[in-house]
């Protein structure tokens, strides 16, 4: 079954404690992307990756890091989380030729 | 800065009504306009529009793009309670066509 998985699904953490949210896909898609969703602001793109070792900034990259060492994985790293990074995070993938994205189930992060 | 604006932000209708959702965009190196439906989970893909004036249809939903005026509309006819959701539009563009900018979303509520 084609799927995008995210872990963890829920996380409560404290300011400054480094964390990683993993994203994995089994569809062999070249493109992967991270978004955050906040009430009234819609989805905002954090980073995207067109292929292995190729990443680029979206609209809100500050405070986040990503890496794409393998095609199937695209982890989102928060080196020093702050309360304004409390949000719902989505990972998404697509093939290089299409814009139809497949979204993961979401990770709800709370930073206190 | 890329921008996508949706209107109205919320809409309440009764079953059987027809609704029109609007999306205007300013996206660098614009490639495509996408519509998504989001219920209480991850967004699901509805349409991708690349060419002006060509209507895409899926059942009671249809959408069209006007690249000259930089907007798109999503029509839903004979609405049902199951159409209640947040409808998101997004503009795809950027230097490598990987950047996706979402609007704030339109919250549609359909009453029986």
Image (cartoon, coloured by chain):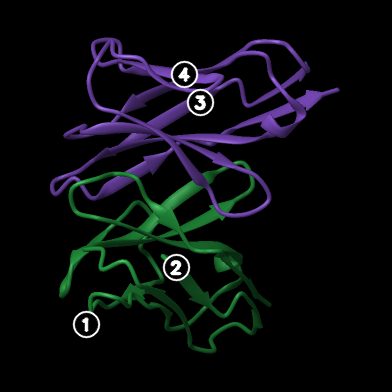
The residue shown at (56%, 64%) is A106
Which residue matches tag 1? A69
Task: Determine the image quadrant of residue B42.
Answer: bottom right
| Callout 2: SS | loop
Which residue matches tag 3? B6
The residue shown at (53%, 43%) is A42
Which residue matches tag 4? B62
Q: How far apart, in angstroms, are the residues tagged by discs 1 and 3?
A: 36 Å
Q: How far apart, in angstroms, are the residues tagged by discs 2 and 4?
A: 29 Å
Q: Point out the residue furthest to the right here.
A: B112
Classed neighbour count for the residue bearing mark 4: other residues with Cα under 10 Å, few (<14), some (14–19), many (≥20): some
Colour for chain A in the figure: green
Q: Is residue A12 above or below residue A85?
A: below
Colour for chain B in the figure: purple
Classed neighbour count for the residue bearing mark 2: other residues with Cα under 10 Å, few (<14), some (14–19), many (≥20): few
Labelled pair 2, 4 in contact (Cβ < 8 Å): no
Q: Is residue A60 above or below residue B12?
A: below
Labelled pair 2, 3 in contact (Cβ < 8 Å): no
Q: Is residue A70 above or below residue B41?
A: below
Residue A1's label in the rendered image is: 2
Residue A22 located left or right of residue B79? left
Q: Point out the residue furthest to the front here.
A: A1
The residue shown at (26%, 63%) is A29
Labelled pair 4, 1 in contact (Cβ < 8 Å): no
Mark in front: 4 vs 1: 4
């Amino acid at each position: 079954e084609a799927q995008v998985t995210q872990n963890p699904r829920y996380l409560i953490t404290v300011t400054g404690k480094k964390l990683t949210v993993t994203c994995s896909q089994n569809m062999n898609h070249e493109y992967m992307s991270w978004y955050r969703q906040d009430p009234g602001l819609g989805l905002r793109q954090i980073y995207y990756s067109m292929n292995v070792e190729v990443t680029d900034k979206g609209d809100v990259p500050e405070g986040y890091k990503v890496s794409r060492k393998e095609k199937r994985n695209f982890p989102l790293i928060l080196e020093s989380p702050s309360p304004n990074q409390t949000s719902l995070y989505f990972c998404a993938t697509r093939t290089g030729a299409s814009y139809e994205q497949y979204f993961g189930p979401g990770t709800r992060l709370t930073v206190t | 800065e890329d921008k996508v604006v949706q209107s109205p932000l919320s809409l309440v209708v009764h079953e059987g009504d027809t609704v029109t959702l609007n999306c205007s965009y300013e996206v660098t190196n614009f490639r495509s306009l996408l519509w998504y439906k989001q219920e209480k989970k991850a967004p699901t893909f509805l349409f991708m529009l690349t060419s002006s004036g060509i209507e895409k249809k899926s059942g009671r939903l249809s959408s069209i793009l006007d690249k000259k005026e930089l907007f798109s509309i999503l029509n839903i006819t004979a609405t049902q309670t199951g159409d209640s959701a947040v409808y998101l539009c997004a503009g795809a563009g950027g230097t490598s066509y990987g950047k996706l900018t979402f609007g704030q979303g339109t919250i549609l509520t359909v009453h029986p």
